[in-house]
Amino acid sequence: MNTPSHAILNLVIFNQQIRTQFSAAILIRAVLPDIPIFVFYFLMKSVYRLPEKQIWSEVYYQHFW
């Protein structure tokens, strides 16, 4: 997950006027690429109740994901 770096990069690229005018849009665009991994983790941890080690060493590498 690179959400903090996505947000920082977007804020650095745009100048001050654009940052203040579109800060909500910039934040949303920074978070959107990471939504699938948040959903994946939520499903595996909360719904299927898998341990961390199994999530990141086995399930994450399955073809479907």
Image: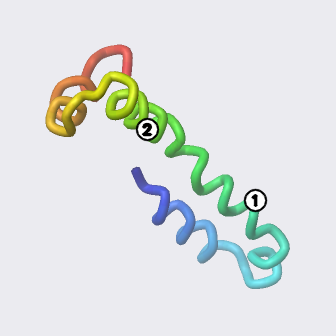
Question: Circle 2 is placed at which residue position?
Answer: 37
Question: Circle 1 is placed at which residue position?
Answer: 25
Query: What amino acid is found at the position of numbered circle 1 in the picture?
Result: Ala
Q: Is residue 65 above or below residue 56?
A: above
Q: Position of residue 27 (x, y in %)?
A: 66, 61
Query: What amino acid is found at the position of numbered circle 2 in the picture?
Result: Ile
Q: Position of residue 64 (x, y in %)?
A: 37, 15
Residue in the picture at 61% in, 66% down? 10
In terms of secondary structure, where does tag 2 sit? helix
Count of marks, rendered view:
2
In the rendered view, does 42 fall on the left or right side of 17? left
Which of the labelled discs sits on residue 35, or is there none? none
Q: Position of residue 19 (x, y in %)?
A: 75, 76
Q: CA distance from mark 2 to mark 1?
A: 20 Å
Q: Position of residue 55 (x, y in %)?
A: 24, 31
Residue in the picture at 17% in, 30% down? 54
Please tell me which of labels 2 and 1 falls first in the chain.
1
